[in-house]
Amino acid sequence: MLTALRQNTPPPARALRKAGAVTELVGDTPLVRIGRVARGLAPGVRILAKLEGFNPGGSVKDRPALRMIQEGIRTGLLKPGQTIIDSTSGNTGIAIAMVGAALGYGVRLVLPSNVSEERKGIIRFFGADIVYSDPLEGSDGAIRLCRKMVGEDTGTYFKPDQYFNPMNSRAHYETTGPEIYRQTEGTVTHFVAGIGTGGTVMGTGRFLKEHDPRIAVIGVEPDAPLHGLEGLKHMASSIVPGIYHEEELDLKVPVSTEAAYDMVYRLSQEEGLLVGQSSGAAMVATLQVARQLTHGTVVTVFPDFGSRYLTTNMWTSWKENLDVGDLEFSI
């Protein structure tokens, strides 16, 4: 009888983090091994993806948003009663709105009007104001409009300026890089990340290179100026972020919108991972890198989950093409 009871005793529960505020839950996201999608690789090669959707604001952008705002408070540049403002394609805006709500600051965000309805809704639900820029001008149009607003009313706003604030990449140097190195027990050989502001690939890559200069750091960008990869920038045709230094990369891989979308569908159906467009692009590039190796640990970043893109062309066109039923996605 005692033997039977012992056999049915559940394993001890894992210790869960306790937090005094939601901001303390940013970071420490899990790595997951990619299996079926990575079939055919050399036996000594594995692919791991860091799931940044597990951050409390739902994306990798929680890290720099929190770090930039904390630094603004520390330096006195962000004063009580000021409004936090920045331009964003969505995820940074959500992160800033979340941190602003948690710390008691008003938030105003400039977004291209064609970002997904889910992201617009989440930002509004955190209590932030939204100003829309021309969708045809993409993230660069949001940058220009935000600069104009701050220039017309300088005393009202604190602008973290994610594209030029060194605390963006510093956040990844201090958190994402150390987490990956620790989680892989120092076995990471290649790091692959999409280029938006450049913060993730720059900061994480810098940390990893300092610990092992042999680690290859690879950036991922859209293969054309007009693309459907929200959050990523085609650098040759864009305002280049001040924190982005291409000479620090070992390689830059262009990825088409179609290939990224196809990979998103594969990840959902073959891995059970519902992710966004930029994650699909990162996975395409990661596979290209991994297929050239005989051994190694390739780590990539999935910036968010796909639930905030269900009303975008990526999923609505997939529904139409594959006849997945009468599902209606709305916010």
Image (spheres, rainbow, N blue to C red):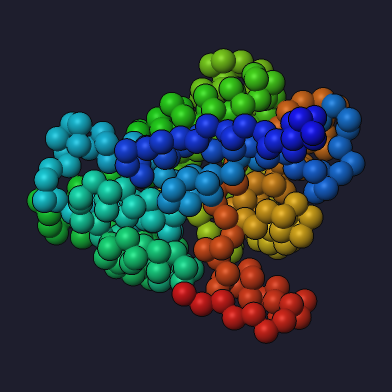
Vertical side of 75 occupied by 94: above or below: below
Q: Residue lying farthest front?
A: 1
Q: How many numbered marks does the figure carry?
A: 0
- Give residue 164's quadrant in the image: top left
Task: Name the residue at 14% across, 35% down.
Answer: 76
Residue 60 percent coordinates (x, y):
49, 44
Viewer-side residue, 251 vs 159: 159
Q: Residue lying farthest bottom?
A: 326
Instruction: For the N terminus, give its image quadrant.
Output: top right
Q: Is residue 172 left or right of residue 42?
A: left
Task: Name the residue at 42% across, 40% down.
Answer: 25
Residue 171 percent coordinates (x, y):
41, 33
Residue 119 percent coordinates (x, y):
44, 64
Q: Is residue 145 left or right of residue 265?
A: left
Task: Name the residue at 14% across, 59% down.
Answer: 152
Task: Name the residue at 76% across, 80% down.
Answer: 323
- Give residue 209's quadrant in the image: top right
User: Do we see residue 96 in this rendering?
Assistant: yes
User: Do we see residue 164 in this rendering?
Assistant: no
